[in-house]
């Protein structure tokens, strides 16, 4: 096996794991300022800066978001952020500069801009997560907050041209889970062109399947997780998630067919 090169940044990234149990200790305000600055220094498509992050301070609101996510530990995090793709701010700026935001001349609400703003929000969140972990904190990225997008929009009073992307819970770790297995490099990194040979792909995945099956998630420490192929097969037929997401995006003013 090829040995990795190491430095503090690489080691933080290679040691990344989701933390779902936190110590009941506050985070130093200087640390929060630092990791927020790290998020702001992430790459931004066309310099539109089309994301925002809402820090949830109110404990009742934290509990309500935890209920949306069906994960009580969300309310226990010392810091909780919800990242949103945000074209509202740019719409306000454009309208002030004479752009007819309610006409077809306004393009910041089309499908391409929606996906790029979503990408920007994810890049910013990942920068914040990495910075937090480098300072000894634990994090978990929360896709579960999208279980009920209309409720989340209502709770955070999100205006049109915004849409929730992911949450990030941060705190001092109260657990040390094992690293979750990662795909073999040979099925995820290719040279020059995509290797679409299904037999070769499945052959290289066979050992990984067993490795995943032997992994014990602390959320259900008594049982190994399903094999990777079983997980993919189950998720591959869930059309409801996509349809709900498209409908909610339209309700927020995005013309996702354009």
Image: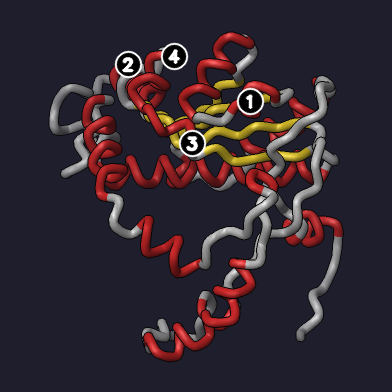
Compare marks 3 and 1 and give the one earlier in the sequence: 1
Compare marks 3 and 4 and give the one earlier in the sequence: 3
SS at badge 1: strand
- Residue carrying label 1: 80
- Residue carrying label 3: 144
- Residue carrying label 4: 155
The answer to whether one can see residue 97 in this image is no
Q: Look at 84% across and 22% down and name the residue there.
A: 25
Whole-number angstrom distance, CA of label 2 to CA of label 3: 36 Å
> Which residue appears farthest toward the left when viewing the image?
104
Q: Nearer the viewer, mark 3 or mark 1?
A: 3
Asked whether the beta carbons under mark 2 and mark 4 sit within 8 Å of each other, the answer is no
Q: Residues within 10 Å of mark 1 (few under 14, many from 20)?
A: many
Return the mark for residue 96.
2
- Image coordinates of residue 46 in percent, x first then y, are 43, 45
Whole-number angstrom distance, CA of label 3 to CA of label 4: 15 Å
Compare marks 1 and 4 and give the one earlier in the sequence: 1
Whole-number angstrom distance, CA of label 2 to CA of label 1: 33 Å
């Amino acid at each position: 096996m090829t040995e990795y090169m190491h430095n503090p940044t690489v080691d933080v990234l290679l040691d990344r794991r989701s933390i779902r149990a936190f110590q009941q200790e506050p985070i130093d305000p200087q640390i929060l300022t630092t990791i927020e600055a790290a998020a702001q220094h992430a790459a931004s498509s066309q310099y539109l800066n089309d994301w925002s992050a809402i820090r949830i301070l109110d404990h009742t609101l934290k509990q309500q978001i935890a209920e949306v996510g069906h994960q009580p530990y969300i309310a226990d995090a010392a810091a909780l952020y919800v990242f949103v793709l945000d074209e509202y701010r740019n719409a306000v700026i454009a309208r002030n500069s004479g752009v007819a935001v309610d006409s077809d001349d306004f393009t910041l609400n089309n499908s391409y801009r929606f996906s790029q703003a979503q990408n920007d929000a994810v890049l910013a969140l990942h920068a914040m997560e990495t910075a937090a972990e480098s300072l000894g904190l634990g994090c978990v990225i929360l896709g579960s907050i999208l279980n009920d997008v209309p409720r989340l929009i209502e709770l955070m009073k999100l205006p049109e041209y915004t849409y929730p992307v992911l949450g990030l819970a941060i705190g001092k770790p109260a657990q040390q889970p094992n690293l979750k297995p990662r795909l073999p490099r040979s099925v995820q990194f290719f040279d020059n062109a995509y290797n679409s040979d299904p037999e070769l792909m499945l052959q290289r995945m066979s050992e990984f399947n067993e490795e995943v099956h032997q992994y014990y998630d602390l959320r259900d420490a008594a049982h190994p997780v399903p094999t990777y192929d079983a997980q993919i097969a189950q998720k591959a037929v869930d059309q409801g998630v996509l349809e709900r997401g498209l409908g909610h995006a339209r309700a927020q003013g995005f013309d996702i067919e354009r």
